[in-house]
Amino acid sequence: MDTAAIFAALDLSPALLSGGPLAVRSPIDGAAIAQVSITEATEMPQVIARAQAAFRVWRQVPAPRRGELVRLLGEELRAAKAALGALVTLEVGKITSEGLGEVQEMIDICDFAVGLSRQLYGLTIASERPGHRMMETWHPMGPCAVITAFNFPVAVWSWNAALALVCGDPVIWKPSEKTPLTALATMNIFARALARFGDAPEGLAQLVVGGPEIGAALVASPGVPIVSATGSTRMGRVVGPRVAERFGRSILELGGNNAMIVAPSADLDMAVRAIVFSAVGTAGQRCTSLRRLIAHNAIRADLVARLGKAYASLPVGDPRAATTLVGPLIDHAARDQMLAALEQARAEGGTVHGGRTVTQGVPQGGAYVEPAVVEMPAQSAIVREETFAPILYVMGYETLDEAIALQNDVPQGLSSCIFTLNLREAETFLSAAGSDCGIANVNIGPSGAEIGGAFGGEKETGGGRESGSDAWKAYMRRATNTVNYSAALPLAQGVRFDI
Ligand code: UN1
């Protein structure tokens, strides 16, 4: 699909794409592809008021009917999958298959949320008093702000929005300033679902495009009880305390520094495939990207040699070409950060393989790099940092305890995995004394999680959970109800208060 066809298929009219102050550049070649309008901070009180008004209507719509809107959204996403996937490629630089995969992730969460719309269950609890019944009811909470990062420009909105909408909460979306086009296109797709649905309140899902000041308005407003924010730990350190200050609820999905332990018994062919996908896929720009390889000393040299071979044949280039596996980084600043991290790794005793800027055989103007493998003598300062680029640090270990200690000895706690055929090792890694991350896998890389599980992590990753399992509870408020169907009024704990 060429750019004009993508824009046409997603109702991105020339009026939407021109005349505004925000320039949108494709990382493929750095070319400006649009000039979009922004939301002024002064408009935010109206945006929040519209969401509040929508909430008063939407919270009374039965949840399965709310699910119908999300079902229609899933249908419209299916119909628009090719175009939206291509736009993700154009705006973020993901290879074609990963652009489409991102839209598939949106479709999957819609399906999940439709089922969920009939399963917002509360418990029935045994009362200590005769003739009484206790139960829990889950109610809509109010407008939910969704602040997203460039690297999953639409999927992260959908994890939050699909759940929030069935839970009865309107959504206000602030995408990364680097990716407003995929957000505008998603809103157009949502508008198609709304038109078919018929009677949804105005302001149910809104988009605000712009800088930190509009995010700050969402974070500060008591009219926005839930703030779900995905991005850097630095951003989370600002958002978390501000939301807490007003007793709002935040769902934080921040940095990761994900590791793989490769044990002596591991299937190395499988491990190599998993390593390459998770370390260089999406050009190392997933929160879940593999950044640290902790290899047993008995297989470490062999593994590094195999990786050297696999990395040597990695096709870096235009993400639209069918054979490309590594597209561009989001911009030149990201490339400079990668080069600076490699420089620091060298200074800390690392041996760097690859990691050079690529200028031949790639579109000019984009930030293309060779993925890097860096052998490190220890888990030094740079290894403990998240650099959003395809750098894989390799360290050795002797005992599993040592490997687990290394895996856990970073500030972040998102995703982790072990490659082993040894049951004791696998189960130890998953146990309370094992990985301290929100995601811990066996014989699977750390990235590419399915939506059915809860997604998120501990420590500086922020503690939030999105997507599957019971993550929906974060979008609702719980009421505990006690019903007395007897003719007496006994007090709990045997208290007597006779009047
Ligand atoms: C992210 O990088 O912000 O597990 C999300 C994965 C994807 C989501 C990543 N399903 O890699």
Image: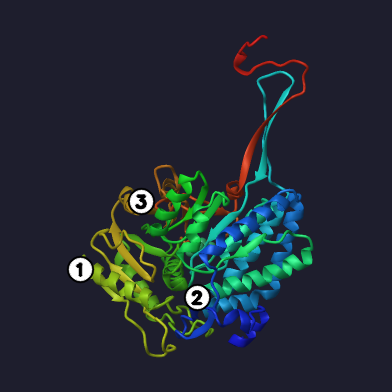
Q: What element carries label 2?
A: helix
The residue labelled by disc 1 is 347
SS at circle 3? helix
Q: Type of residue at label 1?
A: Ala
Q: Earlier in the sequence, mark 1 or mark 2?
A: 2
Tell me the residue at 40%/57% (across/down).
233
- Cβ at disc 3 under 8 Å from ligand 1: no
How far, Cα to Cα, is label 1 from label 2?
32 Å
Given residues 448 and 333, the one toward you in this image is 333
Res 366 → quadrant = bottom left
Q: In which quarter of the image is the C terminus?
A: top right
Asked if marks 3 and 2 touch (Cβ < 8 Å), the reply is: no
In x, y percent, where is residue 125?
A: 66, 30
Query: Is 277 located above or below residue 205 in the figure?
Result: below
Q: Report the residue marked by disc 3.
A: 408
Q: Earlier in the sequence, mark 1 or mark 3?
A: 1
In the figure, is residue 481 to the left or right of 258? right
The residue at 47%/67% (across/down) is 211
Q: Nearer the viewer, mark 3 or mark 2?
A: 2
Measure the alpha-carbon separation of dots 3 and 2. 31 Å
Q: Is residue 247 found left or right of 170 in the rendered image?
A: left
Outermost residue toward the top? 498
